Amino acid sequence: MIQRLAWAMAILTLGGCGMLGRGKKDMNNKQEIHSQGRGIVVDIVDNVNSELWRLHPALHYLKSEVGGMAVAQGLYQGGDSALRADAAAFWQEIEGEYMSYEPNAAVIKGLDSVLRTRAEAMAGRPSRIDVLMIGGNWCSDTRMGLPRLCKALDVLMASTDGNVVRNREELEYAGVLIRLDYRRVNRDKKLIDGVLAGDIFFGQKSITIGRVPEVCVAHKWPVAGVVGGNPSVDFATESRYAGSIVEMPQVSWEADLLALLAKS
């Protein structure tokens, strides 16, 4: 496992900041977006079958989300120039923060144990974790924290064989689906994704946006002590809110994530 992780990190290091995807000209679905006048070139690789996606899926999800805003792609076409500048600055810092962070190997093993136990408890029924990242591209805590969370998820994915990158937002670990979502807010703490604004309903709970980043976690598996009057009701059909990591983790990104998943 150690050799595999070292090899994966070496590939990313050789890619360097802003270099990921170069030399991979034969990849399908690659977009090279040149932003004139802002001094940035964003290469977005959305082919999840590529080697880089399989080695660093959470990193590439975050990079593609931030990169799309940096060059006013998709939802952000014709958007505010200040928002684009914030996204461009974040995009340029992501890999450095990612590479600087070293998740704790013992905690990664703990996450592995919890996920496998939860999957077994579901007895073949779908098991899922939703990870909602609420951040501000302008916020230094967001720009430091979210790449480190992505590093923890990617090290987890690389820790054992057989895990799958299902699509750009969904990872499968030991039969548990991990769904990623990054929502951006402006300096007034209003969502800037599409026309959305205000609070977010997540995991059967209304999340009031305040300090960022906030990483909200929900899960879909049986909850100890939850008993319904109708035995035919499946109380795991919808994801349940497990908790949030606000601004900075109390211990570490991987340890706080483990605490949320283990207690619920």
Image: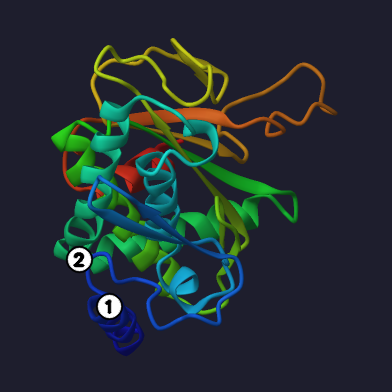
Q: Is residue 214 left or right of residue 176?
A: left
Residue topped by disc 2: 99
Give SS at disc 2: helix
- Vertical position of residue 189 compared to residue 2: above or below: above
Name the foreground residue: 131 vs 73. Answer: 73
Q: Residues within 10 Å of mark 2 (few under 14, many from 20)?
A: some
Image point (56%, 77%), residue name: 27
Q: Is residue 4 left or right of residue 168?
A: left
Q: Is residue 59 visible?
A: yes
Taking 62 as reference, is 192 above or below it?
Answer: above
Quick check: 98 left or right of 218?
left
Q: Percent x, y for residue 219?
A: 54, 38
Front residue of 191 and 147: 191
50, above or below 127, in the image: below
Secondary structure state at the residue bearing disc 1? helix
- Amino acid carrying label 1: it is Met
For the point 23% across and 59% down, the residue is 98
The residue to which callout 1 is attached is: 9
Q: Quadrant of residue 8?
A: bottom left
Q: Residues within 10 Å of mark 1 (few under 14, many from 20)?
A: some
Q: Are dots 2 and 1 in contact, CB under 8 Å?
A: yes
